[in-house]
Image: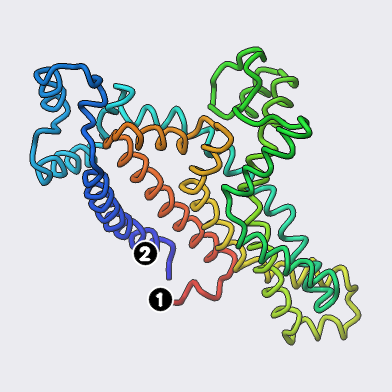
Amino acid sequence: MSIGSLVLRRMALLVLVLFGVTLITFLVSHVVPGDPARMMVGQRASEETVARIRREFGLDQPLHVQYGRYIAGLLRFDLGISIRTQRPVIDDLVTFFPATLELALCSIALAVLVGIPLGVWSAVRKDTVVDHLSRTYSVLGVSTPLFWLGLMMLLVFYGKLGVLPGSGRINPFSPEVPRVTGFLLVDSLLRGSLASFGNALYHLILPSFCLSFVNVGVFARQVRSSMIEVLNQDFVRTARANGISRKSLIYRHALRNALIPTVTVIGLSVGDLLGGAIMTETIFAWPGMGSYVVDSIGFLDFPAIMGFTVFVATGYVIINLLVDIAYTLLDPRIRGVG
Protein backbone atom coordinates (compact mmCIF):
# COMPACT_ATOMS: atom_id res chain seq x y z
CA MET A 1 0.00 0.00 0.00
CA SER A 2 1.40 3.41 -0.97
CA ILE A 3 1.72 6.14 1.63
CA GLY A 4 -0.62 8.39 -0.37
CA SER A 5 -3.46 5.85 -0.38
CA LEU A 6 -2.83 5.16 3.30
CA VAL A 7 -3.25 8.86 4.13
CA LEU A 8 -6.46 9.11 2.10
CA ARG A 9 -7.95 6.06 3.82
CA ARG A 10 -7.04 7.44 7.24
CA MET A 11 -8.58 10.82 6.44
CA ALA A 12 -11.84 9.10 5.46
CA LEU A 13 -11.66 7.10 8.67
CA LEU A 14 -11.10 10.32 10.63
CA VAL A 15 -14.41 11.74 9.36
CA LEU A 16 -16.30 8.61 10.41
CA VAL A 17 -14.60 8.48 13.81
CA LEU A 18 -15.31 12.13 14.55
CA PHE A 19 -18.97 11.74 13.56
CA GLY A 20 -19.39 8.73 15.85
CA VAL A 21 -17.48 10.35 18.72
CA THR A 22 -19.41 13.61 18.55
CA LEU A 23 -22.78 11.83 18.35
CA ILE A 24 -22.13 9.49 21.28
CA THR A 25 -20.55 12.21 23.43
CA PHE A 26 -23.37 14.65 22.67
CA LEU A 27 -26.08 12.16 23.62
CA VAL A 28 -24.30 10.96 26.77
CA SER A 29 -23.49 14.47 28.01
CA HIS A 30 -27.11 15.59 27.56
CA VAL A 31 -28.47 12.55 29.40
CA VAL A 32 -26.70 13.65 32.60
CA PRO A 33 -29.28 15.33 34.88
CA GLY A 34 -28.71 18.99 35.62
CA ASP A 35 -29.04 22.43 34.11
CA PRO A 36 -25.77 24.05 32.98
CA ALA A 37 -27.49 27.45 32.70
CA ARG A 38 -28.61 27.25 36.33
CA MET A 39 -25.12 26.16 37.45
CA MET A 40 -23.62 29.05 35.55
CA VAL A 41 -25.71 31.83 37.11
CA GLY A 42 -26.24 30.24 40.53
CA GLN A 43 -29.24 28.90 42.41
CA ARG A 44 -30.50 32.36 43.44
CA ALA A 45 -30.78 33.72 39.89
CA SER A 46 -34.22 34.48 38.52
CA GLU A 47 -35.93 32.29 35.94
CA GLU A 48 -35.67 35.14 33.42
CA THR A 49 -31.88 35.17 33.80
CA VAL A 50 -31.67 31.39 33.43
CA ALA A 51 -33.91 31.50 30.33
CA ARG A 52 -31.70 34.22 28.79
CA ILE A 53 -28.58 32.11 29.34
CA ARG A 54 -30.29 29.10 27.77
CA ARG A 55 -31.18 31.16 24.69
CA GLU A 56 -27.68 32.65 24.52
CA PHE A 57 -26.01 29.23 24.44
CA GLY A 58 -28.76 27.54 22.41
CA LEU A 59 -29.69 25.20 25.26
CA ASP A 60 -33.40 25.86 24.69
CA GLN A 61 -33.27 24.25 21.23
CA PRO A 62 -34.19 20.59 20.54
CA LEU A 63 -31.27 18.16 20.75
CA HIS A 64 -31.10 17.51 17.00
CA VAL A 65 -30.92 21.26 16.34
CA GLN A 66 -28.15 21.69 18.93
CA TYR A 67 -26.21 18.79 17.41
CA GLY A 68 -26.64 20.15 13.89
CA ARG A 69 -25.34 23.55 15.00
CA TYR A 70 -22.37 21.91 16.66
CA ILE A 71 -21.46 19.91 13.54
CA ALA A 72 -21.79 23.05 11.41
CA GLY A 73 -19.41 24.86 13.75
CA LEU A 74 -17.04 21.89 13.76
CA LEU A 75 -16.74 22.10 9.98
CA ARG A 76 -15.51 25.67 10.50
CA PHE A 77 -13.06 24.46 13.19
CA ASP A 78 -15.25 26.12 15.81
CA LEU A 79 -15.67 24.04 18.98
CA GLY A 80 -18.03 26.53 20.57
CA ILE A 81 -17.84 28.71 23.67
CA SER A 82 -17.18 27.18 27.08
CA ILE A 83 -20.08 27.73 29.46
CA ARG A 84 -17.70 27.70 32.42
CA THR A 85 -14.81 29.90 31.22
CA GLN A 86 -16.73 32.01 28.66
CA ARG A 87 -13.84 31.53 26.23
CA PRO A 88 -13.65 29.64 22.91
CA VAL A 89 -13.10 25.97 23.70
CA ILE A 90 -10.31 25.74 21.15
CA ASP A 91 -8.42 28.50 23.01
CA ASP A 92 -8.82 26.64 26.31
CA LEU A 93 -7.58 23.39 24.79
CA VAL A 94 -4.57 25.09 23.21
CA THR A 95 -3.75 26.60 26.60
CA PHE A 96 -3.93 23.31 28.52
CA PHE A 97 -2.67 20.93 25.80
CA PRO A 98 1.10 21.57 26.26
CA ALA A 99 0.95 20.48 29.91
CA THR A 100 -0.77 17.21 28.97
CA LEU A 101 1.55 16.55 26.04
CA GLU A 102 4.63 17.29 28.14
CA LEU A 103 3.50 14.79 30.76
CA ALA A 104 2.61 12.17 28.12
CA LEU A 105 5.93 12.51 26.27
CA CYS A 106 7.97 12.30 29.48
CA SER A 107 6.01 9.21 30.50
CA ILE A 108 6.53 7.53 27.13
CA ALA A 109 10.25 8.41 27.16
CA LEU A 110 10.62 6.88 30.62
CA ALA A 111 8.69 3.77 29.56
CA VAL A 112 10.84 3.34 26.44
CA LEU A 113 14.12 3.83 28.30
CA VAL A 114 13.17 1.21 30.89
CA GLY A 115 10.83 -1.13 29.01
CA ILE A 116 12.90 -1.85 25.89
CA PRO A 117 16.16 -2.79 27.71
CA LEU A 118 14.11 -4.84 30.18
CA GLY A 119 12.44 -6.70 27.30
CA VAL A 120 15.77 -7.37 25.59
CA TRP A 121 17.35 -8.57 28.81
CA SER A 122 14.36 -10.82 29.50
CA ALA A 123 14.49 -12.37 26.00
CA VAL A 124 18.24 -12.97 26.07
CA ARG A 125 17.97 -14.57 29.52
CA LYS A 126 14.77 -16.49 28.79
CA ASP A 127 13.40 -18.65 31.63
CA THR A 128 15.89 -17.29 34.14
CA VAL A 129 15.23 -15.29 37.30
CA VAL A 130 15.58 -12.06 35.31
CA ASP A 131 12.92 -13.23 32.84
CA HIS A 132 10.53 -14.25 35.60
CA LEU A 133 10.94 -10.90 37.38
CA SER A 134 10.35 -9.02 34.14
CA ARG A 135 7.16 -10.93 33.39
CA THR A 136 5.97 -10.45 36.96
CA TYR A 137 6.48 -6.70 36.62
CA SER A 138 4.55 -6.72 33.32
CA VAL A 139 1.58 -8.38 35.01
CA LEU A 140 1.73 -5.92 37.91
CA GLY A 141 1.89 -2.97 35.53
CA VAL A 142 -1.19 -4.05 33.63
CA SER A 143 -3.21 -5.02 36.72
CA THR A 144 -2.36 -2.14 39.12
CA PRO A 145 -5.10 0.55 39.17
CA LEU A 146 -3.63 3.91 38.23
CA PHE A 147 -5.59 5.85 40.85
CA TRP A 148 -4.36 3.51 43.63
CA LEU A 149 -0.75 3.75 42.47
CA GLY A 150 -0.92 7.54 42.30
CA LEU A 151 -2.40 7.84 45.77
CA MET A 152 0.22 5.45 47.23
CA MET A 153 3.03 7.40 45.57
CA LEU A 154 1.64 10.63 47.01
CA LEU A 155 1.29 9.09 50.45
CA VAL A 156 4.85 7.73 50.54
CA PHE A 157 7.01 10.24 48.66
CA TYR A 158 5.06 13.43 49.42
CA GLY A 159 3.14 12.72 52.61
CA LYS A 160 5.57 10.52 54.56
CA LEU A 161 9.04 11.19 53.16
CA GLY A 162 8.46 14.69 51.79
CA VAL A 163 11.11 14.22 49.10
CA LEU A 164 8.94 14.91 46.03
CA PRO A 165 6.28 17.54 45.27
CA GLY A 166 2.70 16.37 45.22
CA SER A 167 0.98 18.77 42.82
CA GLY A 168 1.41 21.35 40.08
CA ARG A 169 3.97 21.80 37.32
CA ILE A 170 6.34 24.12 39.19
CA ASN A 171 6.85 25.65 42.61
CA PRO A 172 4.36 28.54 43.00
CA PHE A 173 7.10 30.67 44.58
CA SER A 174 9.48 30.19 41.65
CA PRO A 175 9.98 33.06 39.16
CA GLU A 176 7.36 33.01 36.44
CA VAL A 177 8.51 31.35 33.22
CA PRO A 178 7.38 33.37 30.16
CA ARG A 179 5.14 31.23 27.93
CA VAL A 180 6.63 30.56 24.51
CA THR A 181 5.76 26.97 23.64
CA GLY A 182 3.72 26.07 26.72
CA PHE A 183 6.20 23.32 27.61
CA LEU A 184 7.81 24.35 30.89
CA LEU A 185 10.96 22.33 30.28
CA VAL A 186 11.48 23.99 26.90
CA ASP A 187 10.44 27.49 27.97
CA SER A 188 12.73 27.45 31.01
CA LEU A 189 15.69 26.49 28.82
CA LEU A 190 14.79 29.20 26.29
CA ARG A 191 14.77 31.66 29.18
CA GLY A 192 18.12 30.30 30.35
CA SER A 193 16.80 29.41 33.80
CA LEU A 194 18.28 26.08 34.89
CA ALA A 195 16.63 26.47 38.29
CA SER A 196 13.16 26.61 36.70
CA PHE A 197 14.06 23.68 34.43
CA GLY A 198 15.14 21.58 37.40
CA ASN A 199 12.03 22.54 39.36
CA ALA A 200 9.73 21.62 36.46
CA LEU A 201 11.55 18.31 35.99
CA TYR A 202 11.29 17.67 39.73
CA HIS A 203 7.50 18.09 39.58
CA LEU A 204 7.30 15.67 36.65
CA ILE A 205 8.81 12.71 38.52
CA LEU A 206 5.75 11.38 40.35
CA PRO A 207 3.04 11.85 37.66
CA SER A 208 5.27 10.64 34.81
CA PHE A 209 6.35 7.56 36.77
CA CYS A 210 2.75 6.64 37.56
CA LEU A 211 1.63 7.18 33.98
CA SER A 212 4.56 5.15 32.60
CA PHE A 213 4.20 2.26 35.06
CA VAL A 214 1.75 0.35 32.86
CA ASN A 215 3.61 1.06 29.61
CA VAL A 216 6.94 -0.20 30.95
CA GLY A 217 5.40 -3.63 31.37
CA VAL A 218 3.63 -3.48 28.00
CA PHE A 219 6.79 -2.46 26.12
CA ALA A 220 8.92 -5.03 27.93
CA ARG A 221 6.50 -7.83 27.13
CA GLN A 222 6.23 -6.77 23.47
CA VAL A 223 9.99 -6.50 22.99
CA ARG A 224 10.56 -9.82 24.77
CA SER A 225 8.15 -11.76 22.54
CA SER A 226 9.48 -10.08 19.37
CA MET A 227 13.11 -10.67 20.35
CA ILE A 228 12.49 -14.35 21.10
CA GLU A 229 10.83 -14.77 17.71
CA VAL A 230 13.64 -12.98 15.85
CA LEU A 231 16.42 -14.83 17.70
CA ASN A 232 14.94 -18.13 16.48
CA GLN A 233 14.93 -17.12 12.81
CA ASP A 234 17.33 -18.52 10.22
CA PHE A 235 19.25 -15.31 9.49
CA VAL A 236 20.21 -15.02 13.17
CA ARG A 237 21.47 -18.60 13.21
CA THR A 238 23.46 -17.90 10.04
CA ALA A 239 24.96 -14.75 11.53
CA ARG A 240 25.87 -16.66 14.68
CA ALA A 241 27.51 -19.42 12.60
CA ASN A 242 29.55 -16.79 10.73
CA GLY A 243 31.13 -15.70 14.00
CA ILE A 244 29.32 -12.38 14.56
CA SER A 245 29.74 -11.25 18.15
CA ARG A 246 26.89 -11.79 20.57
CA LYS A 247 26.53 -8.06 21.26
CA SER A 248 26.35 -7.20 17.56
CA LEU A 249 23.94 -10.07 16.93
CA ILE A 250 21.53 -8.91 19.64
CA TYR A 251 21.56 -5.14 19.20
CA ARG A 252 22.41 -4.71 15.52
CA HIS A 253 20.43 -7.50 13.93
CA ALA A 254 17.81 -8.93 16.29
CA LEU A 255 16.72 -5.76 18.10
CA ARG A 256 16.35 -3.75 14.90
CA ASN A 257 13.82 -6.25 13.55
CA ALA A 258 12.13 -6.78 16.91
CA LEU A 259 11.43 -3.05 17.31
CA ILE A 260 9.21 -2.87 14.19
CA PRO A 261 6.02 -4.14 15.91
CA THR A 262 6.98 -2.24 19.06
CA VAL A 263 6.70 1.06 17.14
CA THR A 264 2.97 0.42 16.78
CA VAL A 265 2.57 -0.19 20.51
CA ILE A 266 4.53 2.95 21.40
CA GLY A 267 2.55 5.13 19.01
CA LEU A 268 -0.80 3.88 20.26
CA SER A 269 0.38 4.39 23.84
CA VAL A 270 0.92 8.09 23.12
CA GLY A 271 -2.66 8.35 21.89
CA ASP A 272 -3.92 6.51 24.96
CA LEU A 273 -2.00 8.82 27.28
CA LEU A 274 -3.55 11.95 25.76
CA GLY A 275 -7.00 10.76 26.82
CA GLY A 276 -5.92 8.65 29.78
CA ALA A 277 -4.06 11.38 31.62
CA ILE A 278 -7.33 12.50 33.23
CA MET A 279 -6.84 10.32 36.30
CA THR A 280 -3.19 11.26 36.76
CA GLU A 281 -3.79 14.98 36.30
CA THR A 282 -6.64 14.88 38.79
CA ILE A 283 -4.57 13.07 41.45
CA PHE A 284 -1.53 15.32 41.06
CA ALA A 285 -3.43 18.56 40.34
CA TRP A 286 -1.65 18.78 37.00
CA PRO A 287 -3.06 21.75 35.04
CA GLY A 288 -3.62 19.98 31.74
CA MET A 289 -6.55 18.98 29.54
CA GLY A 290 -7.50 16.20 31.94
CA SER A 291 -8.07 18.60 34.82
CA TYR A 292 -9.84 20.98 32.44
CA VAL A 293 -12.36 18.37 31.29
CA VAL A 294 -12.97 17.09 34.83
CA ASP A 295 -13.89 20.61 35.94
CA SER A 296 -16.05 20.95 32.83
CA ILE A 297 -17.91 17.72 33.58
CA GLY A 298 -18.70 18.95 37.09
CA PHE A 299 -20.05 22.15 35.55
CA LEU A 300 -22.00 20.35 32.78
CA ASP A 301 -20.00 22.36 30.25
CA PHE A 302 -21.16 20.52 27.11
CA PRO A 303 -19.03 22.43 24.57
CA ALA A 304 -15.85 21.86 26.60
CA ILE A 305 -16.59 18.14 27.11
CA MET A 306 -17.26 17.59 23.43
CA GLY A 307 -14.32 19.74 22.39
CA PHE A 308 -11.96 17.66 24.52
CA THR A 309 -13.37 14.43 23.11
CA VAL A 310 -13.07 15.59 19.52
CA PHE A 311 -9.55 16.88 20.16
CA VAL A 312 -8.36 13.58 21.65
CA ALA A 313 -10.11 11.48 18.98
CA THR A 314 -8.48 13.54 16.22
CA GLY A 315 -5.08 13.21 17.86
CA TYR A 316 -5.53 9.46 18.24
CA VAL A 317 -6.35 8.97 14.54
CA ILE A 318 -3.45 11.20 13.45
CA ILE A 319 -1.04 9.28 15.70
CA ASN A 320 -2.38 6.06 14.20
CA LEU A 321 -1.64 7.45 10.74
CA LEU A 322 1.92 8.42 11.70
CA VAL A 323 2.48 4.95 13.20
CA ASP A 324 1.28 3.28 9.99
CA ILE A 325 3.57 5.49 7.90
CA ALA A 326 6.52 4.72 10.18
CA TYR A 327 5.71 1.01 10.01
CA THR A 328 5.66 1.17 6.20
CA LEU A 329 9.02 2.94 6.09
CA LEU A 330 10.62 0.55 8.59
CA ASP A 331 9.34 -2.61 6.92
CA PRO A 332 9.43 -2.31 3.07
CA ARG A 333 7.81 -5.76 2.76
CA ILE A 334 4.34 -4.36 3.55
CA ARG A 335 4.46 -1.49 1.03
CA GLY A 336 3.02 -3.68 -1.68
CA VAL A 337 0.36 -5.18 0.56
CA GLY A 338 -3.24 -3.92 0.40
Using the rendered view, name the quadrant where residue 45 is placed: top left
Model colouring: rainbow
The numbered mark at residue 125 is none
- Image quarter hosting the C terminus: bottom left
Q: Considering depth in this image, is 165 or 337 the residue closer to the camera?
A: 165
Q: Which residue is mark 1?
A: 338
Instruction: Name the residue at 23% across, 36% down.
Output: 34
Q: Earlier in the sequence, mark 1 or mark 2?
A: 2
* Image: 253 above or below 194: below
The numbered mark at residue 5 is 2
Instruction: Name the residue at 53% across, 27% down.
Output: 182
Total numbered badges shown on the rendered structure: 2
The residue furthest front is 44
Residue 63: image x %, image y %? 12, 44
Residue 30: image x %, image y %? 22, 44
Q: Secondary structure at mark 1?
A: loop
Q: What residue type is disc 1 on?
A: Gly
Using the rendered view, name the quadrant where residue 49 is placed: top left
Circles 1, 2 touching at the beta carbon (< 8 Å)? yes
* Image: 79 above or below 145: above
Residue 103: image x %, image y %? 59, 39
Q: What residue type is disc 2 on?
A: Ser
Label 2 crowding class (10 Å Cα cut-off): few <14, some 14-19, many 20+? few
Residue 142: image x %, image y %? 61, 62
Label 1 crowding class (10 Å Cα cut-off): few <14, some 14-19, many 20+? few
- Image quarter hosting the N terminus: bottom left
Instruction: Name the residue at 14% across, 24% down.
Output: 56
